[in-house]
Image (cartoon, rainbow, N blue to C red):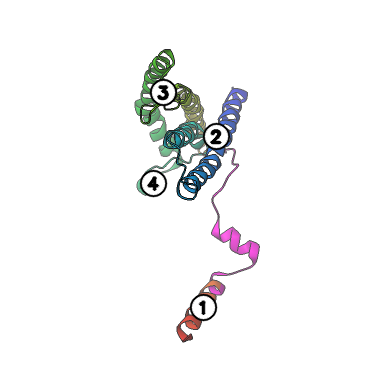
Amino acid sequence: MRKILRFIDKVNTLIGQLFSWCALILTLFVTYEVFSRYALHQPHAWAFDVMNMLYGALFMMAGAYTLGKNGHVRGDVLYGFFPVRLQASLDLILYFLFFFPGIIALVWAGYNYASESWVINEHSTITADGPPIYPFKAIIPIAGFALFLQGFVEVVRCIMCLKKGQWPSRNIDVEEVDVDKLKNMVHVSTQDIIQADEYITDKNRNQP
């Protein structure tokens, strides 16, 4: 069982890392399109569709990855103060009450939506002779299935937390900047930062 759970975690992590490159591709593409439009006076009618599909692919395929890293936004105003077993109990109830029904509906509807698009060889109608969008729509049920599998992993984590009284560890490959760790790395204290800020402020005030 643990091997299966780790495999799902690894696969969704790999998918998230792979599709994260869409952010770089999208940035480069937008930069090129702006340059082409305003500097070369050669806008591309299909650029908007491509931007939408790149962002949509990134957004959908990163869902399971973010869930596996516990990175989705939640209302922590009260939740963060609850004992871990209560947190796990709430998560477990909400997964079965809302998450799984919603994800199953997403996979089912997304499959029908994508299959119809493939059958009619659907292209974008935003512009004349728009690019094909049926490969993009196929991402919807795939992303939903990945979320379903990751939800199963999270349910097992909740059960383990209920048994052991603490959350099991997660694989972490990206972390937000920890200010305290950064201060220790560069050997700077909070007081040093305050003094430097006061020095820069006073210096700017004294300049003519």
Q: Position of residue 106 (x, y in %)?
A: 38, 23
Residue under numbered circle 2:
19
Q: Which mark is residue 123?
A: 3
Q: Position of residue 110 (x, y in %)?
A: 40, 21
Q: CA distance from mark 3 to mark 4?
A: 42 Å
Query: Which residues fall within the magenta stretch?
Result: 168-192
Q: Which mark is residue 76?
A: 4
Q: Nearer the viewer, mark 3 or mark 4?
A: 3
Q: Residue at x 44, y 40 (%)?
A: 72
Q: CA distance from mark 2 to mark 4?
A: 28 Å
Q: Quadrant of the N terminus?
A: top right
Residue under numbered circle 1:
200
Tell me which amino acid carries mark 2.
Answer: Phe
Tell me which amino acid carries mark 3.
Answer: His
Tell me which amino acid carries mark 4.
Answer: Asp
**Mark 2 Cα within 10 Å, few/some/many (few <14, many 20+)?**
some
Tell me which amino acid carries mark 1.
Answer: Ile
Q: Which mark is residue 77?
A: none
Q: Nearer the viewer, mark 2 or mark 4?
A: 2
Dot placed on the residue nearer the N-terminal end, 4 or 1: 4
Q: Residue at x 49, y 45 (%)?
A: 36
User: Helix, strand, or loop for circle 1?
Assistant: helix
User: Helix, strand, or loop for circle 2?
Assistant: helix
As rendered, which of 22 and 39 lies closer to the eye? 39
User: Is residue 191 shown in magenta?
Assistant: yes
